[in-house]
Amino acid sequence: MSAWTSPAAIEVESRLFRALAVLRVVVLINAVGLTIYRAGNFVSPAAALVCALVMVGWTAFVVWAYAAPSRRTAALVGADLAIALGLLLVTPLVKSPAFQASVPGFWVSGALLACAIHYRWIGGLLAGVALAAADLGLRQQNDQSIYGNAFLLVIGGPVVGYMCESVQRMAMERDQAERAAARAEERARLARAVHDGVLQVLALVQRRGGELGGDAAELGRLAGEQERELRALIRGEQPGRGPAAGLAHGMVDLAAALTELETGTVTVSGPATAVEMPADRAGEIVAATRAALDNVRRHVGEDARAWVLLQAFPDHVEVSVRDEGPGIPDGRVAEAEQDGRLGIAGSIRGRILDLGGTAELITGGTGTEWELTVPRG
């Protein structure tokens, strides 16, 4: 389906043709009134009557024909322009070669605007040039007023056509945005439902399976794989979840970037929608998070479970990294700094402090948790 045959574009065109129908009636009354007033300029009263009847009959027909999108064909638009040109061309015959005012007058604007609405600026330009050329070519004398009217025909057609095209594009973009928003809302709702139910059950099965061992451990492993696949599926359905998809230049999706850290032992959770941040700030947050996970693998074990949670707020983001290890003994962090091991001081705290944020370490017998808070600006 062409973009111009989309429901939004057709609705815009229909509204414009309804407005054009009112204009056609107005210019018809003007043309018929002038024909009656200038009846003496015609070769005979019968000629004036025939021209008036043609304009009345054709106006009534096209108002009805343009009302239905299915009837707006090239044949109808072409016939509309041909009737207008025909009334211009017969003017020297039904009046005199030295005529001052054409038979249809402003009535030809109906055909001009119909071409512009249906075929946009190119249709308006071609119709305007054809009508202006016919009008100027038939006259024995052309003054400034006649040239002015011809110029309005040439410039008015493409201007109206361009405006019609612009409004149609805006309507289609709005329609696409509304559909995308509706899809995103529904997917977010499904993601929340899955996260609150299925994913939590799978995580519990994985955890309990590892604790029980034996066949239950294999079941837990399979549950963990399915949990990761389901999380990836949910994230993949969210529009704009790629690191740069749909984001402004220099911005990335922090949620998608953190998701890349997820492994069989690391679970990453975050909002269902993109969390936009400047690329440099997001990169430092990801690096600090990766450093915290490296500490889990190094000091707790390669198979140690860890959880990363991202929370987004209007002015800042919070990232927590938690494990279930034995915790860090008192004084161990200070001792490591004195020995020159700057994993915590440099890779984690240093990065976050440079961003104007805070990095809080909570540790004890039930595990260790980092809470990283960083302004979004």
Image: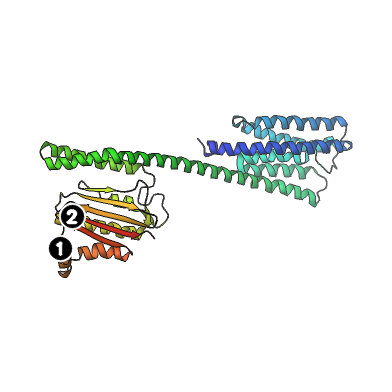
Q: How crowded is the residue under tag 1: few (<14 C-alpha within 10 Å), some, or many (20+)?
A: few
Image height of 348 relative to 165, above or below = below
The residue under the point 80% across, 40% down is 102
- Count of residue discs: 2
Q: Is residue 92 visible?
A: no
Which of the 4 image quarters holds residue 345? bottom left
Q: Is residue 222 visible?
A: yes
Q: Residue 226, how many percent across, how many down?
A: 24, 39
Instruction: Determine which residue is flagged by label 2.
Output: 296
The residue under the point 27% across, 57% down is 371
The residue under the point 72% across, 32% down is 59
Q: Amino acid at mark 1?
A: Asp
- What secondary structure is marked by label 2? helix
Q: Residue 354, how many percent across, how many down?
A: 31, 66
Q: Residue 53, how many percent across, how many down?
A: 79, 30
Looking at the picture, tell me which residue is in the foreground, 178 or 27: 178
Q: Residue 259, how many percent across, how many down?
A: 29, 49
Instruction: Determine which residue is flagged by label 1.
Output: 330
